Image (cartoon, helix red, strand yellow):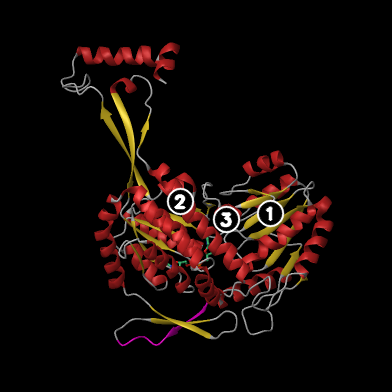
Amino acid sequence: MAIVHPADDTTDGHRRLALASPLDGSPIDELEIATSAEVDHAVEKARAAQRNWAARGVAERAKIVRRAVQIVVDRREEIVATVRAETGKPRAEALMLEIVPACDFLNYWSVHARNVLRPRRQRLHGSLRMLKKLYIEELPLGVVGVITPWNAPFVLALNPVVQALLAGNTVVLKPSEVTPRSSEWVVRVLHEAGVPEDVVQVVHGDGRTGAALVDSDIDKVCFTGSVGTGHKISAACSQRLLPCTLELGGKDAMIVCADADLERAAAGAVYLSMFNTGQVCMSTERIYVVDSVADEFIRLVTEKAAAVTYGSRDADLGPLFWDRQLDVVSRHIDDAKNKGGQVVIGGAVDAGKGLYFQPTVVVDATHEMQLMTEETFGPVVAITRVRDEAQAIEKANDSRYGLSGSVFTKDPVKARRIARQMNTGSVCHNDGAVIYGVPEAPFGGRKESGLGRVNGTDGLRGYTHAQPVLIDRWQSSASSVWYPYSEKTIRNLESMIRFGYGTKLGRWLTS
Ligand code: NAD
């Protein structure tokens, strides 16, 4: 982040926030918070612009959005500089977690949206097909409010905004107050590509501004953020029957089987727990390793974690993005220590100026500890030994979260078998987290990790209303089941039931 403090309000009644660098606490920006009236005004403009935007058709919209790929490529240094100023993340992570997936999403959706969103004909079953034809139209919802977090502020704003636009909606984006300028780049890039100003807009502010957007005259909320805020948004949406997609927090488990490639599993454990300083919804937050290989796994993890560099601008591990996280991570480590967890390396806030927490490995972690039950969002590898794979699955499922998870084994068939038993939105084999960057995968959480899908065909169609249109084939002057009811109506219905469903041949013909 930036570290956020209230600043002096302006004379015209706007609240203001002061942002400071997570690297050294130096001031980087001030943010003027939009009032509720300004949020409403942005939504009004978006609504007025929506009809024309939708009328342009998906092919034309895709052509415009596609130009943004080259703009992101050309302006990547400026985007990276903004992201790094607000988050302190290493350049490699800014490129890998923000720029590369942003280009890929723009590139992918602008090609595939046409296919996913085009009107389609659905073949009907039984005798219905003799009478009717079914078409399904993917109609835009209207105005979509997109509310985003701070941990990957460019790409997590870009992906939902681009999908909503391609589907013919207009968008009002409310980015995190912790990383406002990084997300603002999304809107800037799309305007440069030719998306009209009112079709995609940004309103800045904190939770109150987000709540004002949810209460405004929008047609859908796409929210990415914490479970706590997700509950509030879900409650507000249910009052109005407003559709929402909620992409929330996680406590992802990694299962290390006895037949895993331990070198890869240990390298994965360290990386997947620590990249982006552990502040990824799909960070590996819990590791269950089968006892027979646990000693060697823990030795390798410790060796690799000890080699992770941190504390300077381009080290492997950046600072935490905001001060609140430093408190959460410290609290979880203290709680683990008090309950018998062994901190093998790290475990403390670094003494330097920035928001650095040491790369940390904890073993003998248990489900009595916050470290294994609450989202930590820090550079911590937390390891538990288990008897066998069955116990690993049982422990992995013992969580209120269900975002994603991973299985390390040399046997892909076993990986799929274990995946089927994990109550999570997605599973990766010998990897983790990367699945959000796979646009074909219908990514979304189970349990308290969320509602709805952000990617895949279902994700894109989540920004449309699938409208089935039943076309009459024969245009006869009346239907045989309309008024007036007669003996003939009853006879027709009886024979339909007896022959259509009461015989084997009938069931075959009507299926
Ligand atoms: P947060 O819930 O505090 O804030 C997210 C956004 O919601 C911000 O823009 C914030 O200003 C806004 N907001 C806060 N209160 C609001 C309210 N009452 N009504 C409307 N908007 C409100 O989350 P955060 O700390 O910014 O983000 C970190 C969390 O996001 C973590 O839990 C992480 O796991 C989760 N996350 C999930 C995914 C995913 O795809 N599942 C991706 C990234 C992050």
Question: Which residue position is annotated with label 1?
Answer: 254
Q: Please provide percent x and percent y for residue 245.
A: 43, 54
Relative to 298, does residue 79 appear above or below in the rendering? below
Lower position in the chain sequence, tag 3 or tag 2: 2
Lower position in the chain sequence, tag 2 or tag 1: 2
Query: How far apart in space, not on screen, are marks 2 and 1 (Cα)?
Result: 30 Å
- Whether residue 215 can be seen here: yes
Q: Is there CB contact under 8 Å for labels 3 and 1?
A: no
Question: Which residue position is annotated with label 3?
Answer: 401
Q: Amino acid at mark 2?
A: Trp
| Residue shown at the point (33%, 22%) measured from the top left | 128
In front here: 432 or 170? 170
Q: Is residue 302 left or right of residue 474?
A: right
Badge 3: residue crowd in 10 Å (few <14, some 14–19, many ≥20): many
Q: Is there CB contact under 8 Å for labels 3 and 2?
A: no
| Residue shown at the point (45%, 73%) measured from the top left | 180
Query: How far apart in space, not on screen, are marks 3 and 2 (Cα)?
Result: 29 Å
Q: Please provide percent x and percent y for residue 494.
A: 30, 14
Q: Please provide percent x and percent y for residue 498.
A: 36, 12
Q: Is residue 387 left or right of residue 12?
A: right
Q: Which residues are magenta?
A: 2-11
Q: Amino acid at mark 3?
A: Tyr
In front here: 162 or 432? 162
Q: Please provide percent x and percent y for residue 195.
A: 35, 61
Q: Is residue 3 magenta?
A: yes
Q: Quadrant of the C terminus?
A: top left
Q: Is residue 452 magenta?
A: no
Q: Give the number of the disc on residue 109.
A: 2
Q: Amino acid at mark 1?
A: Met
- Whether residue 340 can be seen here: no
